[in-house]
Image (cartoon, rainbow, N blue to C red):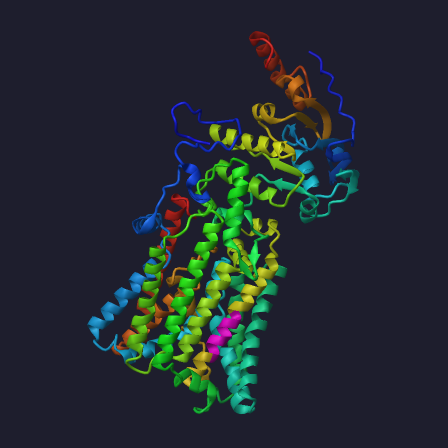
Amino acid sequence: MTLPSATPAPPDVGAGTVLALQGISKRFGAVQALKNIELDVRAGEVLALVGDNGAGKSTLVKTIAGVYTADDGTMVFDGRAVRVGSPAEAQQLGIATVFQDLALCDNLDVVANLYLGRELRKGRVLDEVEMERQSWELLRQLSAKIPSVRIPVASLSGGQRQTVAIARSLLGRPKVVMLDEPTAALGVAQTAEVLNLVERLRERGLAVILISHNMADVMAVADRVAVLRLGRNNGVFVVSETRTQDIIAAITGATDNAVSERAARRSREEGPAS
Amino acid sequence: MSLHGSGTRPQDVTGTPAIPEANGIDQLPADLQDERLIATSGISGAVSAFTARLRSGDLGSVPVVVGLIIIWAVFQIANGSFLSSRNLVNLTLQTTSVGVIALGIVLVLLLGEIDLSVGSVSGLSAAVLGVTFVNKGWPLVLSLLVGVALGLVIGMFYGALYTRFGVPSFVITLAGLLGFLGLQLLVLGKEGSLNLPYDSALVGFATRSFLSPALAYALIAVVVALYVLTRLRTRTARATAGLSTAPTSMIAIKAAALALVLLIPVLILNGDRGVSSMFLLFLALVVATDLMVRRTRWGRSVVAVGGNVEAARRAGINVRMIYLSVFAACSTFAAVGGLLAAARLVAVNQSSGGADTNLNAIAAAVIGGTSLFGGRGSAYSALLGALVIMSISNGLALLSLDSSVRYMVTAGVLLIAVTIDSLSRRSRQAHGRA
């Protein structure tokens, strides 16, 4: 089996592209964590970012989110080159990131968590009623299933907590939302809930970057899949035209290893993957 | 999306906000539409919601109120004059300074930190008041301001050490406990004891100033009216926003309960000298702190930092400023408490703020129900906890038992309170209310 036409997509900073990375490199001491990364994501598109452990996914996400600054390369946001020096700057630009640990305050209720750091006020006093009303409006738009916004976040399920974290990232009216492993450690139903939510973000015209290890999730919601391997681009695939094993081959970097052989054998037995 | 209905798949992926029309869920307020919610309505609903909260370990101030009732009952049986008007007025006077100091401790505990030096800081500010006002003849207001400012500066110093160098607050304030005790002795000099002039305004305020009965009753009326008014306003605002509202009967019952809780003690206190101005100042500070914690962005940030520092930082909260302001507020409250204690005892000496002041204040905050684990507590726990601590001390004094017994009883109550805190925390986690 040969690698399909998986040439990295040319960096087209054309119509619809919200965020484009051009030649992003980052090194930590002697380790080249990222090398010449090219990536672009359009409005209303879910771009999955996949790769094996140590491929550089987290580094890339943190670079985009402003936690790290790239050593080299440019980041084009909304048609102009930008420099993101801190997470706050990234948020102001319109890049929201939901990290894996969610960063919620368990002792506060859903409304307080949603509006943490940007509470609505009437004079000097918190406007709880308006915050609660807008919380419901937002959660309703996302068709999110939260039983009550006045219970501490500690009492919510993993999927609901993820929902709260994602909803919070939307309050800043971002254009790009990055989700770091949103379905890790979630059950079947909760995973489906979060994937629904991702689709809803796409419907709202947001550019979504989804980092995931789970190929089933990636194939279920993503429009395109960008593969990182050992800190370099290893192909961008359009999901509707690609089979899972091709992506896995790109992730593992070989066509003759155990994973891709097994996948290929299975697909021969079962017929072409849907 | 609906989970019930036989034909519906558990995961409805069509994505439309499919609110079923048939069962009239549309008509419900926005916050009651989820079918998984255990809907409670009316007074019986409020009662059952309250018991459910208690069962899950969210005890709030229930243990301390129950404890206070038991303590009062025991002392009243042991000595019939414990609940007399005269003794209760004394109790309010004794409670104030420890309560004010405990108020600062509540704030620090909300952050999950501790301040062990409140006793020394209160003693130092009292010493500064004594020396400047009595020995140097400064105007009273200036002396008071210097005393309070001293607390503020000390707290900011703690906050700076904590935020800049990451020294644990336990160690910083332990150093403060020793250091400021030393400074207090230095400031007081050789004599070591100063009497405040009995006819000064400060001493008058702390020992002889009481509200007239009419004024006390008028104040209660104003407080209850304000309560009802804000509740009704919230109710209208929520109704306009399409959210669920509390029934007016509920508001009426709560207002009546509030009126009773205020009226009965005032009736008893008015049997003797009445409500002390100093105690009223303490109550005002408690209410103000409570509003600051619950209703302002600063307070929300304090609770958030106490719950999850990293989340608060990522939410854009200026975490350093929060630590700094809370340490400053704590030491300022300690200084104010020290000044009030000096005024009430009409003297400043080497043991001002010494002995058990420190631990009484910390114990009061914890006994009152503020968690040692951060992110959970209320300004009212300073009031309730200080009442418990001072009731024990007052009651044992009435029984002519000396300090040895008092220390041991207070220690027992503190242990019980901390155990309840730990147990209820575990239970809250099990019930998802951590």
Residue at 42% x, 37% y: name it.
B25
Residue closest to the eye, A102 or B279: B279
Q: Can you give x and y, in whole percent of width and height, for residue B152 in the image?
A: 57, 72
Q: Quadrant of residue A64?
A: top right
Q: Is residue B317 visible?
A: yes
Highlighted magenta segment, given as a residue range: B331-339
Task: Residue B205: give x, y in percent of width and height.
Answer: 43, 84
At horizontal 60% and vertical 30% (from top left) the residue drawn is A212
Place residue B139 in its image quadrant: bottom right
Quadrant (top left/top right/bottom left/bottom right) for the N terminus of chain A:
top right
Please give the count of numbered marks on the rendered protein. Answer: 0
Q: Nearer the viewer, residue B303 or B188?
A: B303
Compared to B333, does B135 lie above or below?
A: below
Residue A27 belongs to the span the image colors magenta: no
The picture places residue A36, in percent across and down from the top left corner, at 78, 32
- Residue B335 lies in the magenta stretch: yes
Q: Closer to the camera, B318 or A173?
A: A173
Is residue A236 positioned above or below B296 on the image? above
Magenta highlight: main SS: helix
What is the quadrant of residue A44 in the picture? Answer: top right
